[in-house]
Image (cartoon, rainbow, N blue to C red):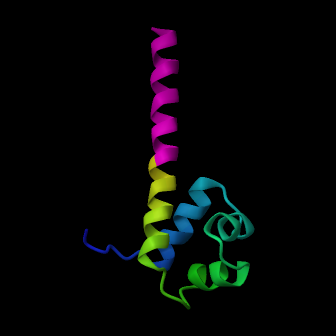
Amino acid sequence: MIADPMGAASFRAAVEFLGLSQADVADRLGVSDRTVRHWLAGRYAIPVGVADEVRAWLAYATNLVERRSAAVSGASA
């Protein structure tokens, strides 16, 4: 697998899209709030494993939205 880095802006957008607080992200990733703050500010590079985990969260959330949308569309048809 090719490592695909995630920049601070993408990380920030993902966290905001998912509606997570910095504390939520820190807790879920097992890191300190300070580390998450540094990632969000672009002070530290986001590890590939963290980027992969955040992308997995996004994929899961997107899947839920798509399934819910299909269920609502099917119910109104």
In the picture, the quarter occupied by the N terminus is bottom left
At horizontal 65% and vertical 71% (from top left) the residue drawn is: 30
At horizontal 43% and vertical 65% (from top left) the residue drawn is: 52
- Vertical relation: 77 (above or below) 20: above
Give how far across and how far down residue 68 sits, in percent: 52, 28
The secondary structure that most of the magenta stretch takes on is helix
Task: State which region is magenta.
Answer: 60-77
Corner quadrant of residue 34: bottom right
Give how far across and how far down residue 35 sits, in percent: 64, 83
At horizontal 56% and vertical 70% (from top left) the residue drawn is: 12
At horizontal 68% and vertical 71% (from top left) the residue drawn is: 26
Q: Is residue 77 left or right of residue 43?
A: left
Corner quadrant of residue 22: bottom right
Is residue 4 highlighted in magenta? no
Is residue 76 highlighted in magenta? yes
Give how far across and how far down residue 50 sits, in percent: 49, 71
In the picture, the quarter occupied by the C terminus is top left
Q: Is residue 66 left or right of residue 30?
A: left
- Vertical relation: 40 (above or below) 16: below
Q: Residue lying farthest bottom?
A: 43
